[in-house]
Amino acid sequence: AYAEMFYRDINRFHESFERVDVMPLGSGALAGLPYNLDREFVSKQLGFAKVSKNSIDAVSDRDFILDYNYASSVTMMHISRLCEELIIWSTDEFGFIKLSKEFTTWSSIMPQKRNPDFAELARGKTGRVYGNLFALFTILKGLPLAYNRDMQEDKEGFFDTADTINSTLDILVSMLDTTQFNKQNMLDAVNNSYILATDIADYLVSKSVPFRKAHEIVSKMTDYCLDNNKYFHQLTIDEFKKFSSDFEIDIFEINPINSINNRNTVGGTSELQVKNSILDIKSRIKSIATKYA
């Protein structure tokens, strides 16, 4: 899921680059030049794809910075979401991952606790990048044509955003490379839960039970399990049949792995689809890298 988010971010930056690949040189202060300047020739010599079409717009335009700040804001939002996942998963309550000591610090009061500092800082710096985007929106919203001195305020936020996102991405890559995943804790969390309730309802539907009725049956089963401190996989076939005679011994074939692999539509969570998605995203990223190399 995050690979798809970051892939869209890559595209967003490249689309922004294509829009900014315009040479304003020759626009003068606002009305063009009285000299015989071959702008197309100069544009090619400087490596621009095209020249600006209107001199007044060229000197007063800051859309290219808004584009960059917006693309950066969306990317930081995606980074922030990922970091929030990492923060939650690294807690003792979950224990799904262990962050490298390089990216954590000791708690100032609890000697046993390590704080996921980088993940929290990345989450916090997202607001800073948002602020740079909205600051420029606010600067530009009431400006008449053409250049106004207000526009000199565009640079501080732009460079701050560039520095912030570049450093954040650099450290994020290193943090992910060194993160350890606790597969057993993840499996235990799935087994010791009621996450397969919908699968059991779908099982009953496959036995010609209307979904409305199947939903009601599994809801009552869940209450029973909670009252008796049990999970679905700990129930006997006789306990299952107390709630519906449609349950057969094959109900025990429902487990987390089968549940995942049953979601075998394109983009689904089955092992096959996830492998295909990994190959696909790698191919798409390679294609972009080749295009803009």
Image (tube, rainbow, N blue to C red):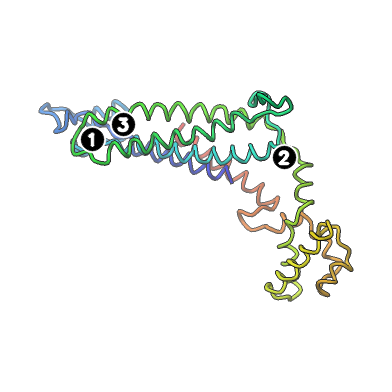
Residue at image location 85% in from the left, 71% down from the top: 241
**Decide: marks 2, 1 in contact (CB < 8 A)?**
no
Q: Type of residue at label 3?
A: Phe
Front-lying residue, 126 or 286: 126
Mark seen at residue 48: 3
Do the numbered discs 3 and 2 sit on residues whose CB atoms are within 8 Å?
no
Task: Find residue 221 and report its image quarter.
Answer: bottom right
Locate residue 106, reporting x and y percent.
67, 24
Could you tell me which secondary element the residue under label 3 belongs to? Answer: loop
Image location (x, y in percent) of residue 252: 84, 61
Q: Earlier in the sequence, mark 3 or mark 2?
A: 3
> In the orientation shown, which residue stands out farthest toward the left?
34
Q: Secondary structure at mark 1?
A: helix
Say if 15 sits above or below 293 in the image.
Answer: below
Q: CA distance from mark 3 to mark 2?
A: 49 Å
Q: Secondary structure at mark 2?
A: loop
Q: Nearer the viewer, mark 3 or mark 2?
A: 2
The residue carrying mark 2 is: 96
Residue at (65, 40) in percent of width and height: 88
Which mark, by number, is residue 265? none
10 Å neighbourhood of mark 3: few (<14), some, or many (≥20)? some
Distance from Cα at disc 2 to Cα at disc 1: 51 Å
Q: Which residue is mark 1?
A: 60
Specify the quadrant of the image occupied by residue 215. bottom right
